[in-house]
Image (cartoon, rainbow, N blue to C red):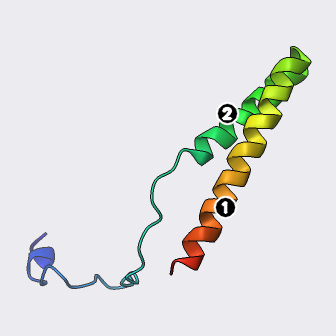
Amino acid sequence: MPNEQSQPPDAVPPGWQVLPDEPLPRPTYFPAGLAMGAAFIFWGLITTWVVWLVGVVLFTAALAGWITEIRHGYKSH
């Protein structure tokens, strides 16, 4: 442990790299909606077509929203 304290706090340990200064994307609910849509799709396969249809609609809406957000995020940089 004494070796760790002898380095300055901003020093990078051997074998590591400094991350580039890129902004992180903002949090979104689209991945959760996509997962829920996939779960409803598979649940609908074993129950009823109404659940399957809700899953398809939710999956499609979440995927379209996520792709749209990613595209607009790249345009703003």
Left or right: 32, with 5 as reference point = right
Spatial separation of the CA atoms under disc 2 and disc 1: 19 Å
Q: Which residue is nearer to you in this view: 76 or 59?
A: 76
> At numbered mark 2, what does the secondary structure look like: helix, strand or loop?
helix
Residue where numbered disc 1 is placed: 68
Q: Which residue is nearer to you in this view: 3 or 56?
A: 56
Q: Which residue is nearer to you in this view: 76 or 18?
A: 76
Quarter the N terminus occupies: bottom left
Above/below status of 41 relative to 25:
above
Above/below status of 57 relative to 61:
above
Left or right: 74, with 52 as reference point = left
Q: How many marks?
A: 2
Q: Dot 1, crowdedness within 10 Å: few (<14), some or many (≥20)? A: few
The quadrant where residue 68 appears: bottom right
List x then y, in percent, for residue 41. 82, 30
- Residue type (three-letter) at the residue carrying disc 2: Met
List x then y, in percent, for residue 40. 76, 27
Asked if one can make out residue 9 in the rendered structure from this viewpoint, the answer is: yes
Left or right: 75, with 49 as reference point = left
Q: Which mark is residue 36?
A: 2
